[in-house]
Image (spheres, rainbow, N blue to C red):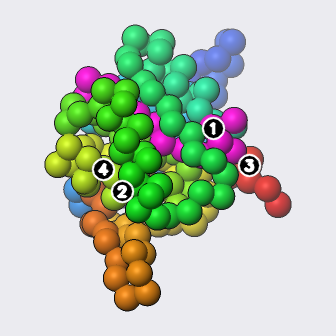
Amino acid sequence: WNWAVRMRRVNGKVEEKEGMAIYAGSFTIVIESGVLSSLATRIIRCAPSRQYVVITDRNVAKLHVDSLTSSFKSINRKIFVHALPPGVTKTRRTKQEIEDWMASVGCGSDTCLIALGGGLIQDLCGIVAKSFSMGIPLIEIPTTLVGMLGCSIRHNSELKISETAVIGADVDPKAVFIDLDTLKTLPL
């Protein structure tokens, strides 16, 4: 565990910024407040790619996607966003729709997938990242408490295909970025 307190000067005043970096085996977990708006350079460092794709749902997109995409645009990086309808289910059909959309915007093995949302989005993106183009880098940005807990440990994602069968994959993200400010936007 590595707890970091950084000092910075803002409008002549000194501010403390706290954050935590946890090295969880093969990936890093960064926990900070307000990290979404400055993630592009960190993501590029963890997963250098030709282009970046964000998969989210429309509710999360309304609240958080502009912060994330503006940080990529400010450094002239190509980023695409696909927002699924609220209440989407974790099925093979949804997985196929994501993969078809990614192919339609020119994604290939040189693409990094960014999962922005709760546990369902994280699970879907985990499986897509493992299967699309024989596997592409995955960055997880959970926005719910359950999603944050799930992403904090090595886990597997699965889709139920019948009463007795599932397809799945071990999720091995390049990094997990937890922005504690996203919890403030959850409905009570």
Residue assigned mark 4: 129
Residue 92: give x, y in percent of width and height: 41, 62
Which quadrant is home to the C terminus?
A: bottom right
Q: Looking at the image, do the residues carrying marks 3 and 4 touch, with CB atoms under 8 Å apart?
A: no
Q: Counting other residues with Cα less than 10 Å from the Cα at mark 1, is it few (<14), some (14-19), or many (20 or more)?
A: many
Q: Secondary structure at mark 2?
A: helix
Residue assigned mark 1: 61
Could you say which is closer to the camera, residue 130 or residue 30?
A: 130
Q: Secondary structure at mark 1?
A: helix
Q: Looking at the image, do the residues carrying marks 4 and 2 touch, with CB atoms under 8 Å apart?
A: yes
Q: Which mark is residue 126?
A: 2
Q: Is residue 35 visible?
A: no
Q: Earlier in the sequence, mark 1 or mark 4?
A: 1
Residue drawn 47% across and 55% down? 94
**Circle 4: residue type:** Ala
Q: Could you give the CA–CA distance between mark 3 and mark 4, rounded to whole angstroms?
A: 28 Å
Q: Which residues are magenta?
A: 49-62
